[in-house]
Image (cartoon, grey):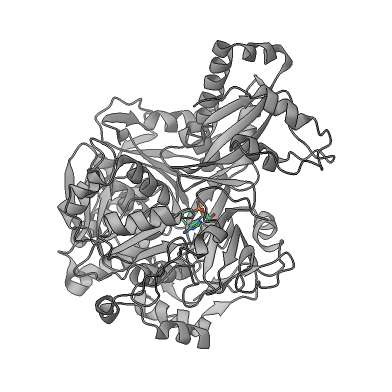
């Protein structure tokens, strides 16, 4: 039922070589997580979360109601409590006497550094909140943040939260067009950006994309954006729109360092984060305050075993993704962690940069994606061997299935054959980790995310929603509400219901295929819908297809995710050219030109991350009699496999045609 590819664990191959690593007694003796948590949560799941909410979050007004599921599928958690997310992340630590603790060790790509304590962060966030207020931002507004990985990115998010304004962070790798549609959908009042950032040793620009995204366009309503706040990072010249654009440093430096946080209801929107779905239009995933903070703090503390006084934590994600929201900004800061934030890529100026940073700061907890681990495997283990990695004690993985080979390499080469590895399954929609080992409690097993966390009801079901027995496969579902669950899709309640709650009425359908092994541990097997996972980033086949057909060269397009050694999946596009261009593809030169034009076009429409790795020009696409493209067959072609069952094709000769036409191997 699920499409397997080389990097997702094939259960058959794995079970015999699976080896579990039990927790060491020393680790177990000091671990935050305790075996009793599973029993407590099983005895009363709702009360378990209420206890976490009281313990880990500071409330202005304590809540008296825990869960209200009467408006399902829109949950209310801790609804009559009031609080502020920025106060929880920053001020309360300063009030507790921890103002001198380092919150952030910032490492810029060019090698510049900055150390920010919790007291510094309190002043910066308060000033930024005052600056935003001066620009007209109020509780309930939306602010789009389009920034590289900077201290200001964290400050900007927290400043919004302090005012009760929802932030919507757009990954800096998205194009002006993608930014434009997100700004419009969110109805943002303010955009916070930078002149640019450093990437691969050179400054790259960001502000021009904002200018393009805000430019008037025929047939579209005028933008809701009143101001653009610009962080200066690279000293690049920027175009300036008088009256609209404001320098961050001028506005923030002029602002007062005291700001009274806005005390909001637990269900007040905290952020909207856009993610790809099965249709062309990205979904604005809405998260609210109290439940989200509770579960991000709980999971960060227990899944990573954070010891706030001694650990140095580092998550390599970008704040443009949910991992950055939950495990750079909210989870770690709520727990008073000291963390590293790094602006650049792992291979600049050399392929040991990450390990050099681990050594420099004595990083003890490290959280990254399988695709990065596989890239490091390719570069060779002699590179990490040059650095002292002995400070590491917990390693995490997220974003895609981790193949057991990469898991074993991660443990052996990075973790000195000693550290637990937590393979954490979750989604933008779930807000926080849902399935993961608990270090010190559960044994860890290469390739398996293993068990639902205490208080989480995750299971694998068949087509009729019956739970599968151990050893069986099916769909991953969540059968009970959880605190950090999405509260909807911004502005589209119906789509929220249709996407997640209609496949199996009353239970949440995650879109992932999964299996249970004989121990009852869960193995994630990849998406079962038209969503691809490229380097841990979620991309929609339909969205890329729409981008391709919006180019005048293209008549029709079909996109598949094909197995890739490093990125997990790679985008492969099959296109039919419009009649007048069809001949151009006949020559090598012509087809190279077409490929380049189309790849650039996708980068412009969506962003460089969505660029197809291969574009194959074909005369026809395989379709069923009802006209549905059979992507499964195209994936066979893209993965150089024998084409599977094609009996439901309307025209069974199509696959022969496609393969004959593609006899010459296409290259990136
Ligand atoms: C999809 C969610 C979770 C933050 C980063 C991605 C896949 C995520 C795992 C894992 C196997 C995983 C799933 C999921 N995924 N973590 N540990 N093992 N697959 O967030 O962009 O919302 O994507 O990523 O397919 O549905 P996202």
The quadrant in which residue 72 appears is: bottom right
Residue 221 appears in the rendering? no
Up the image or down, 450 lies above or below 245; here it is below
Up the image or down, 523 lies above or below 573; here it is below
In terms of depth relative to the viewer, which is nearer, 632 or 603? 632
In terms of depth relative to the viewer, which is nearer, 643 or 167? 643
Q: Is residue 137 left or right of residue 116?
A: right
Residue 134 at x, y percent in the picture: 34, 48
Residue 132 appears in the rendering? yes
Residue 10 at x, y percent in the picture: 55, 56
Q: Is residue 44 left or right of residue 61?
A: right
Residue 598 at x, y percent in the picture: 56, 24
Q: Residue furthest front?
A: 16
In terms of depth relative to the viewer, which is nearer, 335 or 656? 656
Residue 441 at x, y percent in the picture: 37, 78
Q: Is residue 60 left or right of residue 283?
A: left
Quadrant location, the N terminus: bottom right
Identify which residue is drawn at 21% across, 49% down.
Answer: 385
Q: How many marks?
A: 0
In terms of depth relative to the viewer, which is nearer, 477 or 127? 477
Q: Residue furthest bottom?
A: 43
Identify which residue is drawn at 71% across, 18% down.
Answer: 578
Q: Is residue 613 left or right of residue 82?
A: right
């Amino acid at each position: 039922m699920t499409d397997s590819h080389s990097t997702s664990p094939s259960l058959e191959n794995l079970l015999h070589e699976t080896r579990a690593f039990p927790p060491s007694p020393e680790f177990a003796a000091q671990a935050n997580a305790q075996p009793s948590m599973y029993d407590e949560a099983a005895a009363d799941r709702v009360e378990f979360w209420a206890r976490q909410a009281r313990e880990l979050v500071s409330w202005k007004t304590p809540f008296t109601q825990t869960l209200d599921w009467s408006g399902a599928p829109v949950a209310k958690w801790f609804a009559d409590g009031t609080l502020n997310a920025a106060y929880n992340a920053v001020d309360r630590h300063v009030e507790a006497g921890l103002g001198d603790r380092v919150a952030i060790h910032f490492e810029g790509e060019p090698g510049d550094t900055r150390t920010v304590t919790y007291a510094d962060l309190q002043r910066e966030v308060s000033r930024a909140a005052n600056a935003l207020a001066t620009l007209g931002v109020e509780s309930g507004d939306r602010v789009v943040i389009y920034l590289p990985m900077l201290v200001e990115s964290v400050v900007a998010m927290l400043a919004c939260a302090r005012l009760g304004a929802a932030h919507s962070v757009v990954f800096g790798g998205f194009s002006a067009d993608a930014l434009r549609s997100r700004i419009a959908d969110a109805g943002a009042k303010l955009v916070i950006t930078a002149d640019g950032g450093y990437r691969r040793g050179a400054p790259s620009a960001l502000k021009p994309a904002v200018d393009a995204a805000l430019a008037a366009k025929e047939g579209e309503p005028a933008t809701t954006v009143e101001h653009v706040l610009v962080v200066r990072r690279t000293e690049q010249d920027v175009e300036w729109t008088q009256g609209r654009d404001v320098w961050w440093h001028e506005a923030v430096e002029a602002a007062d360092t005291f700001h009274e946080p806005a005390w909001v209801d637990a269900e007040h929107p905290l952020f909207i984060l856009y993610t790809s779905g099965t249709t062309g239009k990205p979904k604005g995933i809405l998260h609210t305050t109290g439940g989200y903070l509770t579960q991000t703090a709980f999971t960060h503390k227990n899944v990573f075993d954070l010891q706030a006084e001694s650990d140095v934590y580092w998550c390599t994600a970008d704040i443009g993704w949910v991992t950055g929201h939950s495990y750079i900004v909210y989870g770690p800061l709520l727990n008073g962690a000291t963390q590293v934030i790094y602006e650049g890529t792992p291979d600049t100026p050399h392929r040991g940069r990450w390990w050099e940073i681990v050594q420099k700061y004595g990083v003890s907890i490290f959280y990254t994606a399988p695709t990065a681990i596989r890239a490091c495997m390719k570069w060779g283990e002699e590179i990490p061997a040059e650095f002292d990695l002995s400070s590491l004690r917990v390693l995490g993985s997220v974003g895609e299935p981790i193949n057991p080979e990469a898991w074993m390499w991660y443990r052996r080469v990075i973790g000195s054959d000693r550290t637990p590895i937590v393979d954490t399954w979750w989604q933008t929609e779930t807000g926080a980790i849902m399935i993961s080992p608990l270090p010190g409690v559960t044994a860890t097993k290469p390739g398996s995310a293993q068990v639902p966390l205490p208080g989480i009801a995750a299971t694998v079901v068949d087509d009729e929603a019956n739970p599968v027995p151990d050893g069986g496969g099916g769909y991953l579902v969540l059968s009970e509400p959880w605190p950090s669950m999405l509260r909807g899709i911004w502005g589209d309640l119906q789509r929220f219901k249709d996407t997640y709650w209609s496949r199996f009425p009353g239970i949440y359908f995650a879109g992932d295929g999964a299996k249970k092994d004989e121990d009852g541990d869960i193995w994630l097997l990849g998406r079962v819908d038209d969503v691809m996972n490229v380097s841990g980033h979620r991309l929609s086949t339909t969205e890329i297809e729409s981008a391709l057909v919006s180019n005048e060269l293209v008549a029709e397009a079909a996109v598949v995710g094909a197995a890739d050694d490093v990125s997990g999946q790679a985008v492969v596009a099959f296109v039919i050219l419009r009649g007048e261009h069809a001949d151009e593809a006949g020559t090598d030169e012509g087809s190279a030109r077409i490929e380049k034009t189309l790849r650039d076009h996708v980068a412009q429409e969506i962003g460089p991350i969505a660029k197809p790795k291969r574009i194959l020009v074909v005369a026809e696409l395989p379709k069923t009699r009802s006209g549905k493209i059979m992507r499964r067959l195209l994936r066979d072609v893209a993965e150089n496999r024998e084409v599977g069952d094609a009996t439901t094709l309307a025209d069974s000769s199509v696959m022969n045609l496609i393969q004959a036409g593609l006899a010459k191997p296409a290259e990136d």
